[in-house]
Image: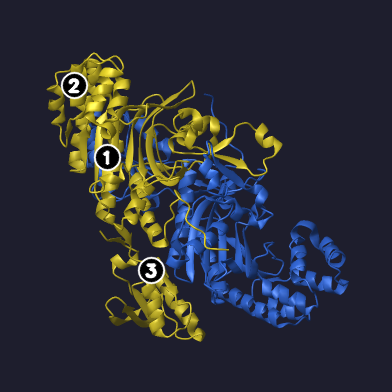
Chain colours: A yellow, B blue
């Protein structure tokens, strides 16, 4: 068999990179849990009837079928597809298990999703998302509109301060603000305006103005006001004045301005410098009804959004109960794979082991195993050399894997830092490596 | 939309159960890392040509196809299928990335796998496995035959002592021992004998004897000796004498006896009482060539094997290099879902929160948020009450979720243990819950 080749759109990490990814996921999970978010996982497949409901995305679905499907498989009803996000399965999970859940229900969910997109830079066919949502039964208070982006910002900030990932800039808007403004202008179809404004980044203000006056029949003054609104972007509450200066008024606008201003204020206090009110953020998806946000890595804007979400009035509805919510989705693969690919980050070693325990001779392997047991009892990851080679060769074994320490002799032995060459007497039951060497670190290369 | 119904064969956990599963996975991962195993994940899909090579299992494969597959998708070659174990993808990963790996290579891999089997008790169409393997390039020393089951036993023992799961009994055999014995008996096709002996549990000794003398043409004396061997089972090295007493000799038998005896001795020292040499263990899979093991939960044998593996001479081969290895696969779903289903274990609460911070009035919500921030800064998971309800209602909110503590007032406030009703003054910046209450615990119901 010849060597297999990588499959486009299905990124796979090397062990060191996977250890970095695990540290990232541990930070996310730790942050979510501190805020009371409970974990769930949903099955990878959903009935096609559920997956295909969103229209636009259905060409991207992977259909799943048993190779030798039996008669009764088809009789059982629906075909299956792989989920392409974690929202559709979460909505189904909430409905299916609602009798066992307490609302408001905070959950996080870290799983792979699949999209049959044409592979290209930054697009994946399989990728990991980490979602948080808080959903209510029938009602969900406004303060959750603040909660979700603040949890997200806290998580990103920990990735920055604890693992050295680039800091983020989260751009936030509020649908009520935009809709209130458009309605205050006398526009009848605020959703249609939002859809056009959403194209600003791609086609520029002139073409958007053309669409607004052409397709939607807005006056030039109205179109200009919409564009002026979308150009407001401030890191503090001064956006409120800038919007007021545009001379439009409505109750919904006031409500949106107030919600967004309180989010900007809370973020400035808790995670200063990371969040901006950016009224150009529209987010195409119809179901958002309040706060919406997108997140970029500062200095790596070309990677696109690495996290987004918003407020929705109806995650799901079963006729009896409607479930409103606020959610945020971290694009874990979208965040990490480009950073690995560009050489921005890497792992300090390719194995968890902080220590290689050398083996003198095969007859004394048991002695080396006892050293390893003593180290592990103190939580120090280590491995025993696979072969009683010359010590120089065993040191090279450690070096090739990035293992910083080699242990020689008995529990009462010697430990060598192979980076400095320093070798000192040590007791395996009490010795500890420096805290920074205990686990593989994230290395910053660019 | 009516309430969705569960999909047979695709078990989904409630949040509390998922927190228990995460603790189980953390113990596994922690144990693997202490022993120097590096994490990898492989994509969920492999080319059908790879998946279908093992013959017997191919009816169970889920084929994956884009809903609107384009021409060039088919042109790109192979159809795709979901992996049904972690061994086939690992073999492909080792070959594809061999230039970036160091051998012997220790890896662990925790992922979902899919099999289109007919759903029934204990059979799943989607389930989580946790695999460890150590593979060499061309060669792999015998001491790894000891290493893998000892790591597996250590992991199971930690699940028992740290989380209170039932202890295990690992039954171990060695293919060399069996093959050496059969050859010593003058049997030409030891593999064929092994296949029949593997059916002992299902059809009993008389029918196996009939197959051996009938299908394979063994003499009654030979068949009786094979059955006598399979009945040897000891928790210490006394199996060696019992086998010797059967009067068969061969070099391969000696080698197998020695390997198995050293494993039994090492296990008796490190994890006493959990491993037995059981010479009835055959394991159907052809590729095992040395130690083989199966694991049951003591007191829950009807659940079947919850972990198995063995030594193989060729995980993969690309014509230039052959990769021998030893591996073990933990059936995480097979272990946990029946224990949840039988009510043996559960979670002490349904949320990570150890504390609910009460809210006096919506106007003072910010004060409650500050209490929560102080608690979180000390690593205490908590949540703020969603609504400034009467305190009795807020306490019931905590109670329904199993949250043990409710905080009243300011950072300098009062904390109530709602189980005992005790309420004491406390400072949120210094107060800590008892260690046992910090995280949700595993509750034992039966």
The answer to the question of whether label 1 and label 2 lie on touching residues, with beta carbons closer than 8 A, is: no
**Frontmost residue, A64 versus B371:** A64
First in sequence: mark 2 or mark 3?
2
Label 3 is found on which chain of the structure? A
- Residue for badge 3: A380
Q: Could you classify mark 1 by the number of other residues whose Cα lies within 10 Å: few (under 14), some (14-19), or many (20 or more)?
A: some
Determine the image quadrant of residue A65.
Answer: top right
CA gap, disc 3 to disc 1?
35 Å
CA gap, disc 2 to disc 3?
62 Å
**Frontmost residue, B361 versus B332:** B332
- Mark 2: secondary structure: helix
- Residue for badge 1: A150
Determine the image quadrant of residue B400.
Answer: top left
- Mark 3: secondary structure: loop
Question: Considering only vertical position in the picture, is A415 above or below B388?
Answer: below
Label 2 is found on which chain of the structure? A
Q: Could you classify mark 3 by the number of other residues whose Cα lies within 10 Å: few (under 14), some (14-19), or many (20 or more)?
A: many
The mark closer to the camera, 3 or 1, is 1
x, y percentage for residue A135?
A: 39, 32
Image position of B206 (left or right of A58): right
- Residue for badge 2: A225
x, y percentage for residue A25?
A: 37, 51
Question: Considering only vertical position in the picture, is B439 above or below B327?
Answer: above
First in sequence: mark 3 or mark 1?
1
- Mark 1: secondary structure: helix
Image position of B359 (left or right of B138): left
x, y percentage for residue B56?
A: 69, 54
Query: What's the residue at 59%, 74% (across, down)?
Result: B263
x, y percentage for residue A312?
A: 36, 28
Query: What's the residue at 49%, 57% (across, down)?
Result: A5
């Amino acid at each position: 068999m010849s060597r297999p080749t990588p499959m486009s759109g299905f990124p796979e990490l090397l062990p060191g990179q996977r250890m970095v990814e695990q540290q990232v996921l541990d930070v996310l999970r730790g942050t979510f849990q501190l805020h009371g978010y409970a974990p769930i996982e949903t099955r990878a497949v959903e009935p096609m009837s559920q997956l295909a409901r969103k229209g636009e995305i259905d060409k991207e679905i992977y259909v799943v079928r048993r190779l030798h499907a039996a008669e009764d498989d088809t009789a059982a009803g629906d075909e299956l597809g792989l989920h392409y996000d974690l929202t559709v399965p979460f909505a189904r999970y909430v409905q299916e298990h609602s009798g066992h859940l307490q609302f408001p229900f905070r959950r996080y969910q870290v799983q792979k999703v699949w999209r049959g997109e044409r592979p290209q830079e930054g697009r994946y066919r399989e990728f990991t998302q980490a979602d948080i949502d808080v959903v209510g039964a029938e009602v969900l208070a406004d303060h959750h509109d603040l909660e979700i982006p603040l949890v997200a910002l806290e998580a990103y900030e920990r990735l920055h301060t604890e693992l050295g990932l680039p800091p983020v800039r989260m751009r936030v808007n509020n649908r009520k603000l935009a809709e209130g403004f458009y309605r205050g202008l006398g526009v009848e179809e605020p959703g249609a305006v939002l859809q056009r404004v959403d194209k600003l980044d791609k086609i520029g203000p002139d073409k958007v103005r053309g669409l607004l006056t052409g397709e939607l029949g807005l006056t030039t003054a109205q179109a200009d006001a919409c564009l002026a609104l979308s150009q407001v972007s401030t890191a503090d509450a001064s956006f409120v004045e800038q919007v007021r200066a545009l001379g439009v008024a409505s109750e919904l606008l006031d409500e949106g301005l107030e919600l967004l201003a309180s989010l900007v204020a809370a973020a400035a206090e808790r995670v200063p410098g990371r969040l901006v009110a950016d009224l150009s953020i529209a987010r195409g998806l119809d179901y958002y009804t309040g706060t919406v946000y997108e997140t970029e890595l500062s200095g790596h804007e070309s990677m696109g959004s690495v996290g987004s979400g918003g407020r929705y009035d109806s995650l799901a509805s079963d006729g009896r109960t409607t479930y409103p919510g606020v959610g945020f989705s971290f694009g874990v693969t979208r965040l990490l794979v480009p950073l690995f690919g560009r050489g921005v980050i890497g792992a300090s070693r390719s194995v968890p082991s902080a220590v290689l325990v050398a083996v003198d001779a095969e007859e004394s392997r048991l002695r080396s195993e006892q050293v390893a047991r003593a180290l592990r009892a103190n939580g120090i990851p280590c491995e025993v050399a696979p072969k009683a080679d010359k010590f120089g060769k065993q040191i090279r074994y450690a070096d090739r894997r990035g293992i910083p320490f080699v242990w020689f002799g008995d529990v009462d032995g010697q430990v060598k830092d192979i980076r400095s060459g320093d070798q000192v007497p040590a007791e395996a039951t009490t010795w500890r490596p420096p805290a920074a060497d205990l686990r593989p670190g994230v290395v910053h290369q660019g």
